[in-house]
Every structure is written in structure tokens, then in C-alpha cells.
Image: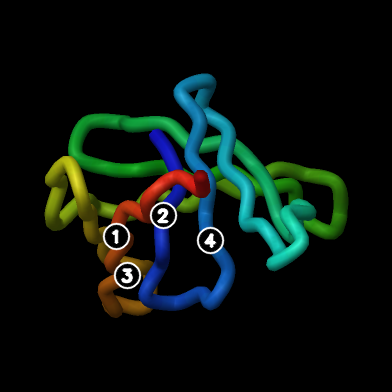
Amino acid sequence: MGRWKSSRLSSPLVLTDKGEWEILSDEGKALQFGLWRLEGAHLVWTVRAPNGGLTHDPTPILIAEPERFAVRERDGSVTTFVRLKDPA
């Protein structure tokens, strides 16, 4: 859980221990949000689709360390997340 810097985003990603995630603007407002869960060796991201349904995006976990993790995206690319220090 905590704040993470993604190799794909300029805004931080926040993961909560309640299984929620959100991407925050510089002002701290949610730009996008959803749910996350672990299923075996996959991190599954869930977002509400424009049609109102839910989209589940299972991403295989390649690296899982206390300060970073990496997942393989559907297109085969790798996204790496590095833990950010909590703001003082």
C-alpha cells in the first residue's frame, strides 16, 4: 500500500489496504480510480468502463519487492512502480 510512481504516469498512484487505487493530480484530486486485488501471481486492476460496466485487467507480477514492483501489460510491455515517500 502507499504512494507509487509508475513508469507510465507522471501523477502518483495510491494503493490502499482496502483494495482501492487512485491516480492523483498535482492538487491531490482523483483523476482515475478503481479497485485492485491479487489473484495468484497477477495484480488485477478493476475500473468502470464508459458503458457503465466493469473492466478487469489482470497483469502478471514480474517483480514484487517492498520498494518496487513490476507487471506485464496486455501489450507485452512492462510497467514498473517505485514507492514514493509519504509527503511530510
Secondary structure, mark 4, is loop
* Residue 5 vs residue 35, the one in the foreground: 5
Q: Which mark is residue 79?
A: 3
Mark 1 vs 4, N-terminal side: 4
Q: Earlier in the sequence, mark 4 or mark 3?
A: 4
* Residue drawn 22% across the image and 31% down it: 40
Dot 2: element:
strand
Q: Which of 73 and 29 is in front in this view?
A: 29
Neighbours of disc 4 within 10 Å: few (<14), some (14-19), many (20+): many
Q: In what quadrant of the picture does the N terminus appear?
A: top left
The answer to the question of whether label 1 and label 2 lie on touching residues, with beta carbons closer than 8 A, is: yes
> Looking at the image, what colour scheme do you see?
rainbow
- What amino acid type is highlighted by mark number 4? Pro
Measured from the top left, where is residue 15 in percent x and y?
48, 39
Residue 41, placed above or below residue 58? above
Q: Give the SS element for disc 1.
A: strand
Mark 4 to mark 2 CA distance (whole Å): 6 Å
Dot label at residue 70 = none
| Amino acid type indicated by mark 2 | Trp
**Disc 1 versus disc 2: distance between alpha carbons?**
5 Å
Check residue 4 in the rendering and tell me which mark sits there, or answer none.
Answer: 2
Asked if the residues shown at circle 4 and circle 3 are in contact, with their CB atoms under 8 angstroms apart, the answer is: no
State the residue at coordinates (32%, 61%): 81
Q: What residue appears at the point 24 percent right and 53 percent down from the top-left corner?
A: 60
Q: Say what amino acid the circle numbered 1 marks.
A: Val
Which of the two marks, 3 or 1, is nearer to us in this view?
1
Secondary structure under tag 3 reads: strand
- Tell me the tag on residue 82: 1
Left or right: residue 32 versus residue 13 is right
Q: Where is residue 35 in the image (x, y as percent from the top left)?
A: 58, 36
Q: Mark 4 points at which residue?
A: 12
Circles 4 and 2, Cβ within 8 Å, touching? The answer is: yes
